[in-house]
Image: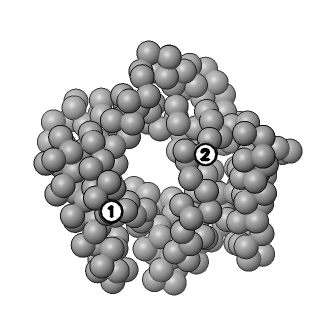
């Protein structure tokens, strides 16, 4: 386990090193650190305890089902972004994933598509803008939402996630809360990887991974989440 963790830390630093100097500039560092401190306090007081409680009562199979369910909605947005990037082959895979997981996979709770060889893609509108040549701009930390860039921040609010179109507002909002808590619970296994200045580590790792994503680097071939 220690060996794997050391490898991942090294990979994070390698990814960060691959970001050019312009992208690594952080002219808003003072403000970003203040927002980061606010987010950290919010997480400590509310979000972290909620996620720990959720993880304590929810079996792994439930966490996986929740991740799959909301991931199925995100596959719709991934498909749209692949179309916008003219990646029609990948978009067809996304479409097939949604069809099979929504039916055979019981509304996406089971990820049958992956077992059928239809591998999950990860594309968002920030990556689409990057593929179109829009520079990332300065690093910014958003209240509640965390690491981002001047390009990715507004892009993250473009409603391509199919869950945002659920008609019933109360159902939609409860789903967003459940999804956020479930996602926070998945981060516990990565927290021990942070070394040195936490703000700088997260910033550099985020920028490096985002650049890798825009450049279509295949993270899954570097390491697998099952290794943690």
Rounded to the nearest angstrom, the CA distance separating label 2 from label 1 is 20 Å
Q: Where is residue 176 in the image (x, y as percent from the top left)?
A: 35, 37
Q: Nearer the viewer, residue 177 or 92?
A: 92
Name the residue located 71 percent from the left edge and 66 percent from the top edge: 15
- How crowded pointer 1 is (Cα within 10 Å; few <14, some 14-19, many 20+) is rated as few
Q: For this rendering, which residue is in front, 153 or 101?
A: 101
Q: Kindly indicate the quadrant of the structure image that contains residue 44.
A: top right
**From what the image shows, is residue 222 above or below residue 129?**
above
Quadrant housing residue 27: bottom right
Measuring from the top left, give residue 42's x and y in whole percent. Answer: 60, 28
Q: Position of residue 223 (x, y in %)?
A: 61, 56
In the shown orientation, is residue 162 left or right of residue 8? left
Q: Is mark 2 on a helix, strand or loop?
A: helix
Q: Name the residue rendered at 52%, 74% in the picture.
A: 216
Element carrying mark 1: loop
Residue 227, label in figure: 2
Image quarter of the N terminus = top right
Q: Nearer the viewer, residue 33 or 194?
A: 194
The answer to whether residue 35 is above or below residue 19 is above
Report the number of discs: 2
Residue at 60% across / 29% down in the picture? 43
Give whichever of 198, 217 is nearer the camera.
217
N-terminal label among 2 and 1: 1
């Amino acid at each position: 386990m220690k060996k794997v963790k050391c490898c991942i830390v090294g990979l994070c630093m390698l990814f960060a090193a691959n970001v050019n100097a312009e992208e690594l500039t952080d002219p808003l560092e003072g403000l970003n650190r203040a927002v980061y401190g606010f987010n950290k306090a919010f997480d400590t007081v509310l979000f972290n305890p909620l996620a720990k409680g959720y993880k304590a009562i929810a079996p792994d199979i439930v966490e996986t089902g929740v991740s799959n369910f909301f991931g199925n909605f995100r596959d719709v947005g991934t498909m749209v972004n692949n179309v916008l990037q003219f990646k029609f082959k990948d978009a067809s895979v996304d479409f097939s994933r949604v069809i099979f997981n929504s039916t055979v996979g019981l509304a996406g709770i089971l990820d049958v598509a992956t077992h059928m060889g239809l591998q999950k893609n990860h594309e968002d509108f920030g990556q689409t803008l990057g593929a179109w040549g829009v520079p990332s701009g300065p690093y910014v930390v958003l209240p509640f939402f965390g690491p981002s860039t001047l390009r990715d921040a507004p892009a993250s609010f473009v409603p391509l996630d199919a869950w945002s179109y659920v008609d019933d507002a109360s159902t939609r909002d409860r789903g967003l809360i459940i999804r956020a808590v479930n996602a926070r619970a998945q981060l516990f296994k990565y927290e021990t990887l942070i070394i040195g200045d936490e703000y700088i580590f997260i910033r550099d790792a985020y920028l490096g991974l985002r650049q890798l994503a825009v450049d279509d680097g295949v993270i899954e071939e570097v390491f697998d989440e099952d290794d943690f």
